[in-house]
Image (tube, rainbow, N blue to C red):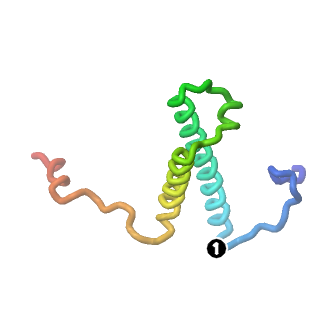
Amino acid sequence: MGMIQHPTGLPMKAEQTFFNDPAIDRLLAMIMTMAAELNVTRDRLTTLEMLLEQGAPVTAKALDEFQPTEEQKAKLDAARQSFANELMFCTLGIEASLGAPEDGVDQFNKE
């Protein structure tokens, strides 16, 4: 097997590890890479929706050159921040699911 090259073309360096098991570091890196890609996709989709709302021609070039208004920029920034907040919430180590309300559980216990 040949030498693996970094996707950027930069030279490879020794692996950084933060956890006792380096597999956890690799898994976290995979999750963050996918999250970054999802965030870019969401951003691009929102931009596409903005172009459609304006009645502008929808082309790859139009998406790449899109310059949001201040209001649109605020909407994009808020969506990015919300995504980052939700993504990182689990790192706080608190319960994310509050469970079903007491009266909601009984509806499934029909005899």
Return the residue found at the far front: 70
**18 relative position to 89: left or right:** right
| Quarter of the image where one finds residue 66 | top right
* Type of the residue with mark 1: Phe
- Closest to the observer: 93 or 4? 93
The x and y percentages for residue 12 are: 85, 60
User: Left or right of 33: which side holds 85?
Assistant: left
Q: Which residue is mark 1?
A: 19
The front one of 36 and 29 is 36
Is residue 15 toward the left or the right of residue 19 in the image? right
Image-based side of 111 in relation to 28, left or right: left
* Mark 1 neighbour class, 10 Å CA radius: few under 14, some 14 to 19, many 20 or more: few
Residue 90 image offset from top left, x and y in percent: 47, 65
* Spot occupied by residue 108 in the image (x, y as percentages of width and height): 18, 48
Q: Is 46 above or below relative to 36?
A: above
Q: Secondary structure at mark 1?
A: loop
Residue at figure coordinates x 58%, y 38% from the top left: 47
Quadrant of res 62: top right
Q: Quadrant of residue 30?
A: bottom right
Q: Judge whether 86 appears above or below 93 on screen.
A: above
For the image shown, how many numbered marks are present on the structure?
1
Residue located 71% across and 31% down the image: 61
> Closest to the observer: 57 or 19?
57
Residue at the outermost left position: 111
Residue at left offset 38%, top offset 67%: 95
Q: Position of residue 81 (x, y in %)?
A: 53, 57
Residue at screen point 62% across, 26% down: 58
Residue situated in front as seen by the camera: 110 or 63: 63
